[in-house]
Amino acid sequence: MTALRLFLACTTAALYVASTNAQAPKPAEKPAEKKADKKESTSDKREKGTLPQYWKQLGVTDEQVQRVYKMQKVVNDEIDEHESKIKLLKEKLAKDRMAILTKEQKERLEAILKEKAGGEKK
């Protein structure tokens, strides 16, 4: 799952950065505006994360890094939700399968599992 998560995060980040870099450049800011922005940005909560391999060598700006981190957080949270749902579905499946067995079949399955667990310890 971590490989899938990494693939999805990298792909999403690459698409997002590519689409935002294609937009028109921002007009040049005045020096007074830059000072105000620096004060605001230092008070903003900065996201933490990791960039895809070799991205630091691309000279990405701090703004791009933060956008990638935020995007990865959103995607990873969504992946976590799906993984939780998958876990619940697997548990439900196991419970529903057990409900199909008779009492004798359940007892026999339990004995088989105990035997296999004991046999592996040798």
Image (cartoon, rainbow, N blue to C red):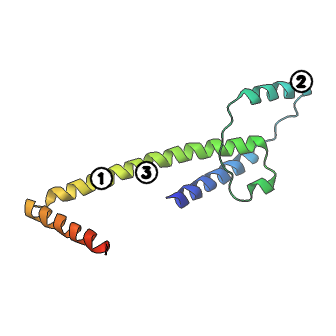
Q: Residue at x 27, y 51 (%)?
A: 92
Is there a contact, CB below 8 Å, between mark 2 and mark 3?
A: no
> The residue under label 1 is which amino acid type?
Glu
Which element is circle 3 on? helix
Residue placed under numbered mark 2 in the picture: 32
Residue at figure coordinates x 65%, y 50% from the top left: 13
Q: Is residue 122 left or right of residue 35?
A: left
For marks 2 and 3, give the one nearer the viewer. 3
User: How many residues crowd mark 3 within 10 Å: few (<14), some (14–19), many (20+)?
Assistant: few
In this rendering, which labeled residue sits more in front, label 1 or label 2? Answer: 1
The image quadrant that residue 11 belongs to is bottom right
Give the distance between the C-alpha atoms of the residues marked 1 and 2, in whole angstroms. 59 Å
CB within 8 Å, label 1 to label 2: no
Question: Considering the image in quadrants, where does the C terminus appear?
Answer: bottom left
Quick one: label 2 or label 3, which is nearer the N terminus? 2
> Residue 53: x percent and y percent?
70, 59
Residue 10: percent from left, percent from top: 63, 55
Measured in 3D between alpha carbons, the distance from the residue under mark 2 to the one under mark 3, in whole angstroms, is 47 Å
- Kindly identify the residue that appears in the image at 65 percent across and 46 percent down: 49
Quarter where residue 39 is shown: top right
Which residue is labeled 3 in the image? 83
